[in-house]
Each structure stands twice: as structure tokens, then as C-alpha cells.
Image: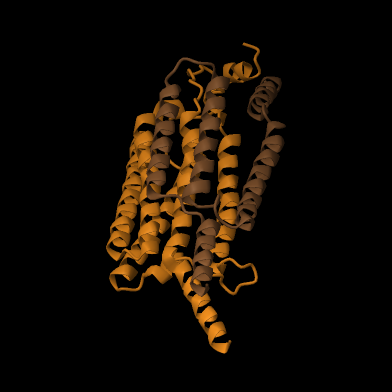
Chain colours: A orange, B brown
Amino acid sequence: MAQAVATLETAQGAGHAGHDDHGHAEHPPTSMGVDSRKIAMWVFLASDCMFFGALIATYLIYRGRAEEMVRAGQGTGPLPFEILDIPYTSVSAGVLLMSSLTMVFALAAVQKGDTRGTRIWLLATSLLGSIFVGGQFFEFTEFHHEGLGLTTNIFGSSFYTLTGFHGAHVTIGIVMLLTLLVMSLRGNVNKRDAMNVEIVGLYWHFVDIVWIVIFTLVYLIPYEKVEETKTEVEGALRLLGLV
Amino acid sequence: MAHAIGQAGHAEDHAEHGHPDERVYIKIAGILAVITAVEVAIYYFDMSRSLLVTLLIIFSIIKFVTVVGYFMHLKFDDRRLTWIFLAGLFMAFAVFIALDVIHKSHKLDYAQDILAVEEHAEAAE
């Protein structure tokens, strides 16, 4: 009887160890029954939702203001309709989307214990992220050459703040990915460490979904085309709908 | 019998964690790329602004939910993680609504200020 119980306990232990095939921690002894690191990352992402929510909300309430100022003869361009490059940004949106796919492959590789695959996909994700950030950097410098600075007009302020913070988030994500890559090269990322790759993956997918929102609200939703006004009063009368 | 229990536990764990195949992820990425291409294409179509904005928002929501559900694995994970994320989203949306309502009450500041300054200047003359 005792031997049967011992055999049963060993089999159950083997069954539990079998859960590790996908690199998941088997029933962690936490109060929630879910790995604490995963809960921590989700709570952080919920707070980051609010961070980007505030920036996006600010951008949206100021949408159209720069155009109003120019029509009132008070503001200066460049305005969004003159400067935003949709085809260019579409490519960078596609790049970030593909980086989410490579991130999924990296997680799948580490969960299968495929060390080489893990490194390849982590590197691929970092490279695609770097291409995105490089593209943002190029876009910002182009805009600056065309006369749009952080303090040029309300569009410049809200645009650079929102997309700049997003770019900073992507950069931090790249640092995390490269850290994982270095750890992997040192033999410190194995199947049992899959949770570390998973939580970095969660962060990475989050910056991707933020860009999905930004791309639509900032770039794709059309802007008003504005012609210049001659005097401030004429601009004010136009604003009031009297002309 | 002990082996069968282990196997059942293992199978139960598969069901509990629920992993789509890698090919599913490739299909999902393909669909997301197609939706992005459609979004960019309709930007150039001649259609009413409200229709365009509605379509763009619908496509964005589809992409958003797909990435969160599949790539972030939320569809297959503990429901409490979904509630945690939705709480953040809800509060972000509430902030946007509040800002929008407050801001709309000051729509024509600039125009009225300019006219007031002009009137003052004329009166002073």
C-alpha cells in the first residue's frame, strides 16, 4: 500500500513536471495561483494604458486646434495635412506588427527549450524594433527640417510628446529584448525561465497595440486643409461662422 | 493507473493553458497585415469622413483585440488578468471622455478674445 502511494505520488510529480513542456510554472504557490511576475506585468500594462490614454486624449482634444489658430491668423504651420506621410508610417506600422510575430516565435522557442531559436527570434524582434525606432527618428528629423518643432504649434507639442513617449517605450523594450538575448548567450535563459521571456513579450505586444491606436488616431483619420487668412479679424469672423 | 493520472494531468494542463499552433500565429499576423493594408487603402478612397472614421476605428479595435487575445495570450489565460487589463483601459477611456467634455466647453476662446481686443483698441482710439 505504502509503495502504491509512493508510486502514485511519483507519477503525479512526473505529471506535474510534464506541465513544463510548455515552460509554464506548474501551479505556483502564490495567493492568486498565477505567477506573480505575470500579474505584475499586467498591472503595469494597465497603468501604462492610463499613461498613453492621457497622452492620446490630450492629442485628440487638441486635434484641429493648430488649424483653427492658422485660420484665425494667430498660429503657424506646418499643419498635419502638410507634413504627415501615410505611406512611410504604414511601413513602420507593418514592421512593428511583424515584430510582434517574431516575439511570439521567441516565446514558443524558449517554451520548447529551443535555445538557438530563442536567440534568433529575440534578435529578429530587436532588429525590427530598432528599424521602427530608426524610422521614427528619421521622421522626427524630417519634420524638424520642415519647421515643426516641439514648441512650433499645439500640433507639434502634442504629436512629439505622444509619439516620442511611444518611441521611448519601444526603445526600453529593445533594451529588455537585448538583455534577454545576452542572458541566453550566457546560458541563463532556459525552458524553466520562459516566464521571463513571456513578460517581456507582453510588454512588447503592448507597445505594438499602442501604435495600432496611435497610427489610426494620429495619422489615418483625415485632417482639415486650411488656407491662409489675411487678417486676424477675418480669421476670427471665420471661426465664428460670420464670413 | 498512476501513469494514466499523470497523462490526464498533462492533458488537463494543455486544456488549461491552451496554446494555438505557430501556424495560427502566422495566419493571425497575415490577417493583421491585410487589415492594415485595407486601412491605408480606404484612407485614399473618396468617402464621407464619418464612414471613413467609423471603418478605421472598427479595424483598429479588431487588430487591438486580436493582438491582446492571441499574441498576449489573454484569451487563454486566467480571467483575472483580463479584468486587470480592462480596468486600466476603462480608466483611460474615462479620462478621455472627461477631458473631451471639459474641453468642448471652451471651443471659441481664440475668436472671441481677438474680437474683444479689436473692440477695445477701436474704443481706445
In the rendered view, tell whether residue B55 sits above or below residue A122: above
Give the camera-side residue of A114 and A132: A114
Name of the residue lying farthest toward the bottom: A2
Seen in the image, is A106 located left or right of residue A224?
Answer: left
In the rendered view, tell whether residue B14 sits above or below residue A70: below
Looking at the rendered image, the quarter that the N terminus of chain A falls into is bottom right
Question: Residue placed at 48% from the left, 56% from the top?
Answer: A202
Seen in the image, is B83 located left or right of residue B27?
Answer: right
**Residue A161 visible, this orientation:** no
In the rendered view, tell whether residue A3 sits above or below residue A204: below
- Residue A185 appears at what percent x and percent y? 28, 69
- Residue A82 appears at what percent x and percent y? 41, 26
Name of the residue lying farthest toward the top: A243
- Residue A85 appears at what percent x and percent y? 37, 31
- Residue A242 appears at what percent x and percent y? 65, 12
Question: Residue placed at 44% from the left, 57% from the top?
Answer: A201
Question: Residue placed at 45% from the left, 46% from the top?
Answer: A208
All told, the count of numbered labels is 0
Give the camera-side residue of A133 and A17: A17
Give the camera-side residue of A146 and A15: A15
Question: Residue placed at 50% from the left, 59% from the top?
Answer: B14
Seen in the image, is A191 located left or right of residue B13?
Answer: left
Give the camera-side residue of B75 and A55: B75
Looking at the rendered image, the quarter that the C terminus of chain A falls into is top right
**Residue A118 visible, this orientation:** yes
